[in-house]
Image (spheres, rainbow, N blue to C red):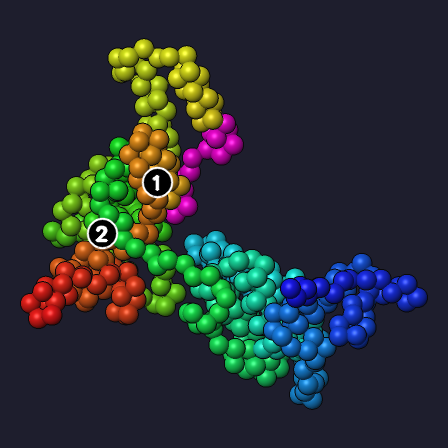
Amino acid sequence: MPRPKRVPSYCLHKPSGQARVILDGKHVYLGPHGSTQSREKYARLLAERYTLGGDAASDQDAQGSKNHYPDLSINELLLRYLQFAETYYISQGQPTGEVGNLKDAMRPLRALYGTTPTADFGPRALKAVREHMIAVDNLSRGVVNGRADRVKRIFRWAVSEELVPPSVYEGLRAVAGLRYGRCTARETEPVRPVEDQWVQAILPFLSPHVADMVRLQRVTGIRSGNLVTMRACDIDQSGKSWVYEPPHHKTRHHGRRLRVPIGPQGQAILLPYLNRPKEAYLFSPREADEWSRAHHQRMPKIRKTPIYPCELKRLEREQQARQRRQRRRPPGERYNPDSYRRAIERGIEKANAAGIGVPHWFPHQLRHTRGTEVRRKYGLEGAQLALGHAKANITEVYAERDLELARRIARKTG
C-alpha cells in the first residue's frame, strides 16, 4: 500500500531565525519565524504546489512598464477598493448586499496573498485562491465563479485607477470559469417552484401580515425585496389592474423601471392595509408583533381543554423569549427579506411540529411558481412580462417548461 504524501512542515531555521519549508529537497525561506508574512507565504506555497501541481518557487516575469505604478500589496489594494465599494454600491443611503459579497471574495485572497505585491498576482495565483475556496471553504461551483469574478472586478477597477499594470488584469481575464462536470467543486440543485399545497399548509401558522405577504407574492411573483418595501404612494390604483412601481429595485442603476401589475386577487389582499399614511410601509412587523402577543394571551381563554402544567411552563418560556427579543431589538417599521424568510421558516417549523410534514421552502420559490404558472398559460413572453425581466433568457431560469404538452405530443406521435 503506498504511503500518503506528507505535507512539508513549517519549521524554524535556528541559525537565521527564519521560518523555512523543504520542497523537493530545496530549502525555501519564508521570513521571520512566526510572522504573518511567513505563515502566509507557507500557505501560499502549499496551495500553489498541491492544488495546481506546479512549481511553487516560480515567479512571474517582471515588466518594465510597471515601474511607475505604486508599490501596493494585495491588502492595501483591497482596502482602497472597499472604501470605493462602500460609496458606490449603495441604495437608499445604505450599502447593498454586494459589499458583503465583496468581503467574502476578499477573505481567501487576503489569507493567501495579503502581503504579495499586486503586480505579482497572476492567473496561477487566482487559480490557487479559487482552489482554496473549493478545498477549504467547500463552496459550490456557482459561488466560486461569482467570487472569482469579483476578484477580477477589483483588479479591473485598479487598472482604471492606474494602481496596477493593465497586463495584470488581462492575465486574470484569461482564467475561465469552472465548468459543470469538469471541476471538483460541488454542485447545487436549481431552485424549483414550490407546490401550492405546501404554501397553503403553513398559512394558518403565520401571522396575518406574513400570510398576506405570502399570498401577494404568490399571485404577483414580486421579489421579496420589493414586497417588504411596498407603500400606498407607490401603487397606481387608477385602473382595473393596479400597478406597483417601487422607487428602488434590483435593476434601478441600469435606468430601468419596474412595474408590477396587481389583479383582483392581489387588490383584495392589499385593501385592509391601505388605511394608513401614504408614505407608511404596508406590512409592519410592529403590528404583527402586537397581533402575536394578543393572540397568545387569548389562546388560554379560547381553548376548552384544561392546560397541563407542562404546557403552562412552555407558554411561560415563550412569553419570556418574546420579552427578551423585544428588549434586545424592538420590531422595525418594515420587514426585510431576511426577516420575511425567517418568519416563513418558523411557520414551516410550527406546521411540522403539528405533524403536517411540510418540506422546507423559501420565499423566492414563489416567484418561480408564478413564472411557471404564467408561462404555462401565456407562453415565455407572458412570463417575461409578468416577472419584469429585461431578457427572455432570464425568464427561462424562473419559469420551467410545461412538460404536459411534450407528453401529449409523445402520446400522439411517439
Residue found at the far right of this picture = 15
Q: Which amino acid type is marked by label 2?
A: Thr
Give coordinates of residue 123: x percent, y percent.
58, 77
Q: Which amino acid type is marked by label 1?
A: Ile
Compared to 379, does 62 lie above or below? below
Instruction: Residue at 82%, 64% (x, y): give it.
Output: 19
Q: Quadrant of the C terminus?
A: bottom left
Compared to 379, does 54 lie above or below? below
- 327 or 48, which is in the foreground? 48
Which residue position holds label 1? 344
SS of the residue under disc 2: helix
In the image, residue 335 lies in the stretch drawn in magenta: yes
Asked if residue 252 lies left or right of residue 194, the reply is: right
Compared to 86, does 128 lie above or below? below
Instruction: Residue at 47%, 29% (x, y): give it.
Output: 326
Magenta-tinted stretch: 324-339
